[in-house]
Image (tube, coloured by chain):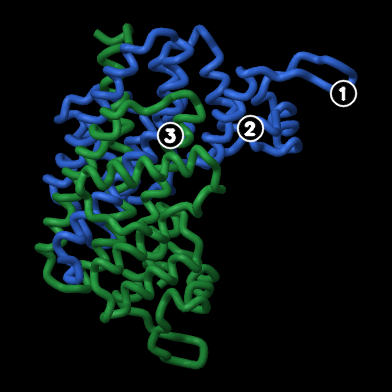
Chain colours: A green, B blue
Amino acid sequence: LSHASDVSVPTIKYYLREGLLPAGEPTAANQARYDETHLHRLRLIRVLRTVADLPIATIGQILAAVDDQEQPLHHVLGVAHAALNPPPAPEDQLLIEAQREVDAWLGQLGWRVSAQAPARGALAHALASLRQLGREHSPQALDIYAEAADRVAAWELDRLAATDTREEQVENVVVGTVLYEAVLTALRRLAQEHHSTMRFDRKQP
Amino acid sequence: LSHASDVSVPTIKYYLREGLLPAGEPTAANQARYDETHLHRLRLIRVLRTVADLPIATIGQILAAVDDQEQPLHHVLGVAHAALNPPPAPEDQLLIEAQREVDAWLGQLGWRVSAQAPARGALAHALASLRQLGREHSPQALDIYAEAADRVAAWELDRLAATDTREEQVENVVVGTVLYEAVLTALRRLAQEHHSTMRFDRKQP
């Protein structure tokens, strides 16, 4: 398993002890056989560790939701989002105001998002930080980002609904949230560089 | 300064020692006066620490590029992107293939992005991870995310070009890259929840 995955034996043993990885089929006193499902689960753990930088305990919570056949897909999405979100910032007046503003704006948009959605706090924190730096966002700014986010998410959920099995669906929710966030972030930076080159780089023809 | 910023005195002293924060105007043997520019710089450091989770040395590099009046804006964007990007993953065959694919695809798109842009590696890493998990991206997927990223970045660079002073511009580059990335990421999650509610949540009317 270590050879196939490029993950060290001590790390694999640690994941086994923590219950992230199911035990292999025992073949001798000190040996076990691992199959494709173990390799796949190990790769999933590595993505959550290295790309999303999640702590082991949080990965355990996500995998438990993935493995629990009773959990509806909508709930798994909530668990993944809660896990990915930074802990709430200390309460201050700017943040409370920003939170109120986010709630009102989401209401106007008509987005059906639970009052406890952790991304509300993440958005409010970013807006409060901008305000504190004297870089108040324009009302238009939020709409521009929201429109881009809405297009992407509508396409993602369409694709998810077209996926056959629950197993595939929940893994797509977890992997897609993390890895396509990395894709979107990288593409935004590449697009920024492209538009910056076009406008500001005098060296270019 | 500590009172105005809610940052502890030892942390402020640490930033002064590391050269992130310019010294105040001495008023007595053990006292100095700090003004609005110190408070603003301190808030900028806190955003880079807490939102972008950057190490002190990296923040130092970004601030040096911000403060160097000779540096063109396009260069500051490059410094900020390099700082924000995770170190390159260990080379393996999947990653090398993904890198080649990213380069070819960006060439087709016609985006003018330097061959060393760190976001190329970040994108390749995400695509290689998807492939390793058996979740090959569809060619259409990249186009969907690229279109969203392109709209957002075009609007961002338009707004930047309309900003008056170089000082405002470079700070917008640094703050905008970090904080609007957080805005976009939070909005994608909120939009996902909205579309998930619409499709999968039977409890809703």
Residue B178 numbered mark, or none: 3
The spot of residue B1 in percent (x, y) is 70, 28
Name the outermost residue toward the right. Answer: B29
Q: Check whether the beta carbons of the residues at disc 2 and disc 3 lie within 8 A of each other.
A: no
Is the C terminus of chain A in the top left, top right, bottom left or bottom right quadrant? top left
Q: Which residue is mark 2?
A: B5
Q: Chain of mark 3?
A: B
Numbered label attached to residue B172: none
Identity of the residue drawn at 31% across and 72% down = A66
Relative image position of residue B103 (x, y in whole percent): 24, 34
**Residue type marked 3:** Val
Neighbourhood count class around disc 2 (C-alpha, 10 Å): few under 14, some 14–19, many 20 upward: some
Between the residue at mark 2 and the residue at mark 3, the CA separation in whole angstroms equals 20 Å
Residue A199, quarter of picture: top left
Residue B18 as seen in the image, left or right of residue A136 = right
Q: Tell me which numbered mark, 1 or 2, is placed earlier along the sequence.
A: 2
The quadrant of the image that shows the N terminus of chain A is bottom left
Left or right of B138 in this view: B40: right
Give neighbour class at mark 1: few <14, some 14-19, many 20+ (Cα, 10 Å).
few
